[in-house]
Image: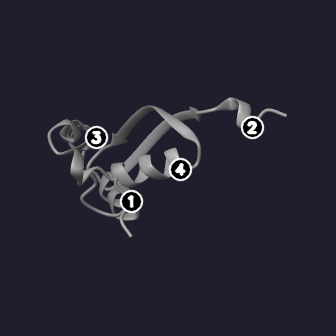
Amino acid sequence: MRLDRQMLFSLIQEAGFVVLEFGSYLIRPFINVKMEKLISQNIVSTSVVAGLDGMIKYMPELRCEMFVNMKVNDRSKYDP
């Protein structure tokens, strides 16, 4: 199962939270271990990694890591 933005937001709302901020990190053409190896061997430079991160605004559907800041939607349900 691939978790996309819409599915993530639905799960968050179903759990009683509201999204405050959403974002994502870079486009990753290889798995983490491979990317780390390519960077450590200077095959891929940090400027390439920065470029992959900047591509998010043009191709958000290719993002590899998402983050969400959220809060409880109705605090009274959780306060004693």
The local secondary structure at tag 1 comes to loop
Q: CA distance from mark 2 to mark 4?
A: 15 Å
Near mark 3 (Cα within 10 A), the count class, few <14, some 14-19 or many ≥20, is few
Camera-near label (2 vs 1) is: 2
Q: Is residue 60 above or below residue 7?
A: above
- Name the spot of residue 1 as percent of width and height, x first: 39, 70
The local secondary structure at tag 3 comes to helix
- Where does label 2 land, which residue? 78
In the rendered structure, which amino acid carries the disc numbered 2?
A: Tyr
- Name the spot of residue 74 as percent of width and height, x first: 63, 32
The residue shown at (53%, 34%) is 70
- Where does label 3 land, which residue? 46
Camera-near label (2 vs 3) is: 2
Q: Is residue 75 left or right of residue 27?
A: right
Q: CA distance from mark 1 to mark 3?
A: 28 Å
Near mark 2 (Cα within 10 A), the count class, few <14, some 14-19 or many ≥20, is few
Q: CA distance from mark 4 to mark 1?
A: 15 Å
Near mark 4 (Cα within 10 A), the count class, few <14, some 14-19 or many ≥20, is few
